[in-house]
Image (cartoon, rainbow, N blue to C red):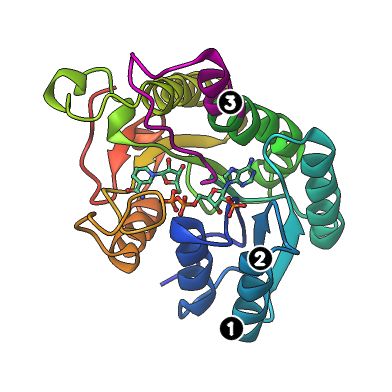
Amino acid sequence: MAALARSVLVTGSNRGIGLELVRQLAASPRPPQHIFATCRDPEGPRGKWMLCDLLELSSTLLFALADAVNLPSIRGAVRAVGSHLKDQGLNLLINNAGVSSHATLRSLDSREMLSAFATNVVGALVSLLQEFLPLLEKAAKGVGKEGLSCSRAAVINISTKLGSIGLCLKVPEAPMYPYRASKAAQNMVTRCMAAELQDKGILCVAIHPGWVKTDMGTEKAPLMVEHSVQGILTVLANLSQDTSGAFLDWEGNTLPW
Ligand SMILES: NC(=O)c1ccc[n+]([C@@H]2O[C@H](COP(=O)([O-])OP(=O)(O)OC[C@H]3O[C@@H](n4cnc5c(N)ncnc54)[C@H](OP(=O)(O)O)[C@@H]3O)[C@@H](O)[C@H]2O)c1
């Protein structure tokens, strides 16, 4: 089986789903030629551990600092990735970094709402895409590439079904206003990106990873991170023109926006 993409960048890769994405990509039989693992605190204990652990796994892995709410740090990551790729573009950008918030209507304050939007929508999505777009466009123009796929150029936004407006009345037990509202906004950004970027050869999809045992998902979650990520990578390998702009879960099922 061909590699998913020649180059892949994952945000928030020091723990949880992001770390497992990088680990499985690096360990796959046909790994990408370049894997860029980014996180916001490489000097922190989790960042250091990740770096040692993952660098042992793969020589194709490059580590970069990227704090989603810090534009200079995103630009620094773009420069590092661009100079590593030389004249090639970046094929696959996985926007995984995100923060949760359990605030209810009663406990909610504007600071918490704005903070969720600052990370999940403005930083992790819009700023990141704006800055990496030239590298994605370069990949999309690569020789012999047609149609839409992760091997050509793609933006994958890790979303959640808690951000689905269509499903909201069916999942009322977790109001989580800042998290759900910011993920609903993230979904709209994904749709807008998909519409705008398809003519440039860039595929955009939102993926719900399931309810996963991570710091965010907690121990109560039914799904192991390994299992969720296996599913996500299988879904990514099968994305095409037909699924650009879709909202899918880790098993490939279509979710209502
Ligand atoms: N777990 C679930 O059940 C579940 C379900 C649906 C959707 N998701 C989505 O899946 C994604 C990953 O979640 P997870 O479960 O792996 O969560 P997690 O274990 O809490 O990890 C979150 C990651 O995002 C990073 N991050 C947060 N703010 C950042 C910022 N400003 N800049 C850069 N990185 C930042 C964290 O870095 P630090 O270590 O520096 O904080 C960490 O690497 C999120 O987008 C989440 O909404 C998760």
Residue wearing tag 2: 47
Asked if residue 30 is positioned above or below residue 114 in the image, the reply reads below
Observer-nearest of 136 and 212: 212
The quarter of the picture where residue 33 lies is bottom right
Amino acid residing under circle 1? Leu
**Residue that appears at 79% across and 59% down:** 85
As drawn, which residue projects farthest toward the front?
A: 107
Q: What kind of residue is marked 3?
A: Ser
Cβ–Cβ below 8 Å for labels 2 and 3? no
Residue pictured at 29% horizontal, 31% vertical = 162
Horizontally, is 72 left or right of 170 in the view?
Answer: right
The residues tagged by marks 1 and 3 sit, at their Cα atoms, a distance apart of 35 Å
Mark 1 burial class by Cα count in 10 Å: few <14, some 14-19, many 20+: some
The residue that label 3 is drawn on is 115
Q: Is mark 1 within 8 Å of ligand 1?
A: no
Q: Quadrant of the N terminus?
A: bottom left
User: Helix or strand or loop: what does disc 1 sit on?
Assistant: helix
Nearest to N terminus: mark 1 or mark 3: 1
Q: Residue at x 66, y 55 (%)?
A: 39
Magenta: main secondary structure equals loop
Residue for badge 1: 57
Residue 206 is situated, as x and y percent measured from the top left of the image, at 40, 36
The question of residue 117 being in magenta is answered with: yes
Position of 150 compared to 50: left or right? Answer: left
Q: Is residue 32 magenta?
A: no
- Magenta residues span 96-118
